[in-house]
């Protein structure tokens, strides 16, 4: 039933716990002589009122007496009562219920009537033993004798009911206190605190809200604790109600309270509510409720883990607001971890990489990103995304950061694809091909081992809108994706870098290459850059030549390539080729085509040296700030900028890049970018239109720099944006009007930006980037750095480091990973890596096939790497792997020959 709670008194109660067992000090009687009649009558009225002290209770003998000296107690009786009370309270403090009861019986036997404090001790003894029924029986016993219970007694009962979770009985005690006209505020506090202490949050909410709505004001600490506990339990409604009641008492909600509410809103899959709360904090205008770093973290988390829609634009908006408040708010490890999680899940690996570089510089950052594997294991998703994109140096950097933080690699990061390769080798060409282990694979035994007969084998199916049946379906679309090889990624990064160089050259002019550069050299540089940007020609699926049009040599080459006999005349060879092709088609095999010998690209060191002089200023805010304000001159635009001709704009058109695609290439760098969709299938190259455009562009660049007036003043880069602007004549003097009724914005772009700067609409401080706001000092150097060229040796070295680092972090590479790395080292060739790879393979318990060992040892002997061959043989014998006599004889003979040659 609803319990009416009285309006609290204005008396402020102390915040300390109530002393349950401390008796009130005894009040001594006042001796008076003969008194007037009205004084006697006043004394009689006091005797009728119930007493709150055991000392004021008369003994049984004195109460039967009609003598008017009842208020006078003999010294013997007071001493006796004091002795009994001291003994009773000592037993009550020890929780001795029987001892307290015996003390009360002894008081009655001694002729003393037990008072409210005696029964208070009895109730307290039951409270200390947690006996709710016994405490209530003691209270009923006192009430049956007409004794009014003390305030402390009822507070002790409220504490007991709170510790047992009996919120209803506790409210009944509060109602009884109101009837006795006691102040319930302290008992209400005690009841709520005990309910919270013993994890009875639901009952605490009922008692607290009922009391708050009745007008009882809690301490500030209790308001904070109630809101905090409700938010931890996810009870947003009660937390919000208590916050409203708190503000009604005059205590305003601070940033801490709003962050607690945001912690609940961020997990309810409705980020719009969290953003509305953030707006209330941001635009309230009060400093005590301004958003801090945790506020932004909760809002970012709400959008990142929202199940529907693409939330990247919303997160970009939040980041913009955070950057505007950069002087007061700075990110912490959780901010970076959430941003890495967001951009990884939405396949924006460039942004994820930027924020991970900042996170890895904070001790324990990878542990924050791992988050104990919750929410889809963002750390594993990030590692796999780097592997899918072919960013192997960055992957190795992330593994080293995990090693520094002592963070083990999770099984989700080591997922095996359909070709039984993990992130250790899935980025090494050839992609999506199973490794050559040196022996025939028993596919039936593998199928049985994987649980094919029991139904436990993982099924690889595309999603296609169906329920995910693949082994990795949480937070990341994964159904055996095709990785980008490390080789392709390096070529793509080189194209992106040289595209930036070409644009910078177009804007700055040929003078950045040097003053001694000839016109023909500029044309060659432009042609060379555009050739790199265009990339190699697309690989077209080659079809075999018709057998009827092939000569005898071609027929024999095809048969020899398939291991078929090559004897006979042309008719026999023709029939044999046709039969082989029919068999391949029926079995779904690709037809044999002649291998293509790839030509090595010629390196022009002169052009590379000229291009290396170009210092990109991408991300250098200080440079562009000075350029914008005209403090740094632009060699290309010392005079007013001329309108670009149509021929100079054909560069972008021939590259088939619009403005949106350029931004995407720079920020996201997607895979498989085609710089030229129109392929030229003609074999004649003397009439290539691209070369003519390159030459025309180089001539234009040289013409512009020759026409520049070196004595002219530096030009604002902002004025270069106005391409259609015509410079005013020198005879006319421009006068600016600043009246409010007239248009004071001048048409002259130089004067326009000058006025914006003077009037405060634009300041140099407004120009900053994320790196400037958050102190990413390393980013400018990374953007200036020229990408390193791919080489087979570098690829093998990276693969070995990643394999060793994965093993160190608790991962287990597959035997396919080891065989792929060994095959890459053989292609390089890199004999010094053979022993390392094979020793690591054997340490994992894997054994490769004999032909693979023979091939590695033979290659070492051919390259005269005798030490590597001996190390391989020694490791094989140590692990019990049989070495053929032929290989062993070759190693021993080569060792003897090497010693004799060294002596000679």
Image: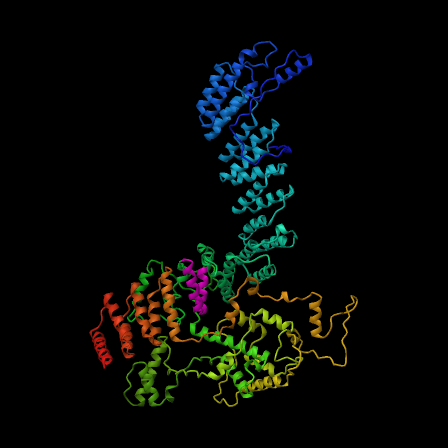
Question: Residue 379 versus residue 525: which sits nearer the camera?
Answer: 525
Question: Residue 494 versus residue 620: which sits nearer the camera?
Answer: 620
Is 6 situated above or below 284?
Answer: above
**Magenta-span inclusion, residue 413:** no
Question: Where's the N terminus, which quadrant?
Answer: top right
Asked whether residue 429 appears in the rendered view, the answer is: no
Question: Residue 366 versus residue 338: which sits nearer the camera?
Answer: 366
Q: Main secondary structure of the magenta part?
A: helix
Q: Is residue 558 left or right of residue 748?
A: left
Q: Which of the 4 quarters of the picture holds residue 890? A: bottom left
**At 57% across and 38% down in the image, what residue appears?**
208
Question: Where's the C terminus, which quadrant?
Answer: bottom left
- Residue 409 image point, x, y percent: 40, 59
- Residue 361 image point, x, y percent: 48, 61
Asked whether residue 882 appears in the rendered view, the answer is: yes
**At 32% across and 73% down in the image, what residue appears?**
832
Q: Is residue 731 left or right of residue 366?
A: right
Residue found at the far top of this picture: 66
- Residue 225 image point, x, y percent: 55, 43
**At 35% across and 90% down in the image, what residue appears?**
551
Is 595 situated above or below 669?
Answer: below
- Residue 389 image point, x, y percent: 46, 69
Q: In the rendered picture of this protein, how many numbered marks are placed on residues?
A: 0
Q: Which of the 4 quarters of the picture holds residue 145? A: top right
Is 424 situated above or below 85?
Answer: below
**Magenta-span inclusion, residue 397:** yes
Part of the protein shown in magenta? 379-407
């Amino acid at each position: 039933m609803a319990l009416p709670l009285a309006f609290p008194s204005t008396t402020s109660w102390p915040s300390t716990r109530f002393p349950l067992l401390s008796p009130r000090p005894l009040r001594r009687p006042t001796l008076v002589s003969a008194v007037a009649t009205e004084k006697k009558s006043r004394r009689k009225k006091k005797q009728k009122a119930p007493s709150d002290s055991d000392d004021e209770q008369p003994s049984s003998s004195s109460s039967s007496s009609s003598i008017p000296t009842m208020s006078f107690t003999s010294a013997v009786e007071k001493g006796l009562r004091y002795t009994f009370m001291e003994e009773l309270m000592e037993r009550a403090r020890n929780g001795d219920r029987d001892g307290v009861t015996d003390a009360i019986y002894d008081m009655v036997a001694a002729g003393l009537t037990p008072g409210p404090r005696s029964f208070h001790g009895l109730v307290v003894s039951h409270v200390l033993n947690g006996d709710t029924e016994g405490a209530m029986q003691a209270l009923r016993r006192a009430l049956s004798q007409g004794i009014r219970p003390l305030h402390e007694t009822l507070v002790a009962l409220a504490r007991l009911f709170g510790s047992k979770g009996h919120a209803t009985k506790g409210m009944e005690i509060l109602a009884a206190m109101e009837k006795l006209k006691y102040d319930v505020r302290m008992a209400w506090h005690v009841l709520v605190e005990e309910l919270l202490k013993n994890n009875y949050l639901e009952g605490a909410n009922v008692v607290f809200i009922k009391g708050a709505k009745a007008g009882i004001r809690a301490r500030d600490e209790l308001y904070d604790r109630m809101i905090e506990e409700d938010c931890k339990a996810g009870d947003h409604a009660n937390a919000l109600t208590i916050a409203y009641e708190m503000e009604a008492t005059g205590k305003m909600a601070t940033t801490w309270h709003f962050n607690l509410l945001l912690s609940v809103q961020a997990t309810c899959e409705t980020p719009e509510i969290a953003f509305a709360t953030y707006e209330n904090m941001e635009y309230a205008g009060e400093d005590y409720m301004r958003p801090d770093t945790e506020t932004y973290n909760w809002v970012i988390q709400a959008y990142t883990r929202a199940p529907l829609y693409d939330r990247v634009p919303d997160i970009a908006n939040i980041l913009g607001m955070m950057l505007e408040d950069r002087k007061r708010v700075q990110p912490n490890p959780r901010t970076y971890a959430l941003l890495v999680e967001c951009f990884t899940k939405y396949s924006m690996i460039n942004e994820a990489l930027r924020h991970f570089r900042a996170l890895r510089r904070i001790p324990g950052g990878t542990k924050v990103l791992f988050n104990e594997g919750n929410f889809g294991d963002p750390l594993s998703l990030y590692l796999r995304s780097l592997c899918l994109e072919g960013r192997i140096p960055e992957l190795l950097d992330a593994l080293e950061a995990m090693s520094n933080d002592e963070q083990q690699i999770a099984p989700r990061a080591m997922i095996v694809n359909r070709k039984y390769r993990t992130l250790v080798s899935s980025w090494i060409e050839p992609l999506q091909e199973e490794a050559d282990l040196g022996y025939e694979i028993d596919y039936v035994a593998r199928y049985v081992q994987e649980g094919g007969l029991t139904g436990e084998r993982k099924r690889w199916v595309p999603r296609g809108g169906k329920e995910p049946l693949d082994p990795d379906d949480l937070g990341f679309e994964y159904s055996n994706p095709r990785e980008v090889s490390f080789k392709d990624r390096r070529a793509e990064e080189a194209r992106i870098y040289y595209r930036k160089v070409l644009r910078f050259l177009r804007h700055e002019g040929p003078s950045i290459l040097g003053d001694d550069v000839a016109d023909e050299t500029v044309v060659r540089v432009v042609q060379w850059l555009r050739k790199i940007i265009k990339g190699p020609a697309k690989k077209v699926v080659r079809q075999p030549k018709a057998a009827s049009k092939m000569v005898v040599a071609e027929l024999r080459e095809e048969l020899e390539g398939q291991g078929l006999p090559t004897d006979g005349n042309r008719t026999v060879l023709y029939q044999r080729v046709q039969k082989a092709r029919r068999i391949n088609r029926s079995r779904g095999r690709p037809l044999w085509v002649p291998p293509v010998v790839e030509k090595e690209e010629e390196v022009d060191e002169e052009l590379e040296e000229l291009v290396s002089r170009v210092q990109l200023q991408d991300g250098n805010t200080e440079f562009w700030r000075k350029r914008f304000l005209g403090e740094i001159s632009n060699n290309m635009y010392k005079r007013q900028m001329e309108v670009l001709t149509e021929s100079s704009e054909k560069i972008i058109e021939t590259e088939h890049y619009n403005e949106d695609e350029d931004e995407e290439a720079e920020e996201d760098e997607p895979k498989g970018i085609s710089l030229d969709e129109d392929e030229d299938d003609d074999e004649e190259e003397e009439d290539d239109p691209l070369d003519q455009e390159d030459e025309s562009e180089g001539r234009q660049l040289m013409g512009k720099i020759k026409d520049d007036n070196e004595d002219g003043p530096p030009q604002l880069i902002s004025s270069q944006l106005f391409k259609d602007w015509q410079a005013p004549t020198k005879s006319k003097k421009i006068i600016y009007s600043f009246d409010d009724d007239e248009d004071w914005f001048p048409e002259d772009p130089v004067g326009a930006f000058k006025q914006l700067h003077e009037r405060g609409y634009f300041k140099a401080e407004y120009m900053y980037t994320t790196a400037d706001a958050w102190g990413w000092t390393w980013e400018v150097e990374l953007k200036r750095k020229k990408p390193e060229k791919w080489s087979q040796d570098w690829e093998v070295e990276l693969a070995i480091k990643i394999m060793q680092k994965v093993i160190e972090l608790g991962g287990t590479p597959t035997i396919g990973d080891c065989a792929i790395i060994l095959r890459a080292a053989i292609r390089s060739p890199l004999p010094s890596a053979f022993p390392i790879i094979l020793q690591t393979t054997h340490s994992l318990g894997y054994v490769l096939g004999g032909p693979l060992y023979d091939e590695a040892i033979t290659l070492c002997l051919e390259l005269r790497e005798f030490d590597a061959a001996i190390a391989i043989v020694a490791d094989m014998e140590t692990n019990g792997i049989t070495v053929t006599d032929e290989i062993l004889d070759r190693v021993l003979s080569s060792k003897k020959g090497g010693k004799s040659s060294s002596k000679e």
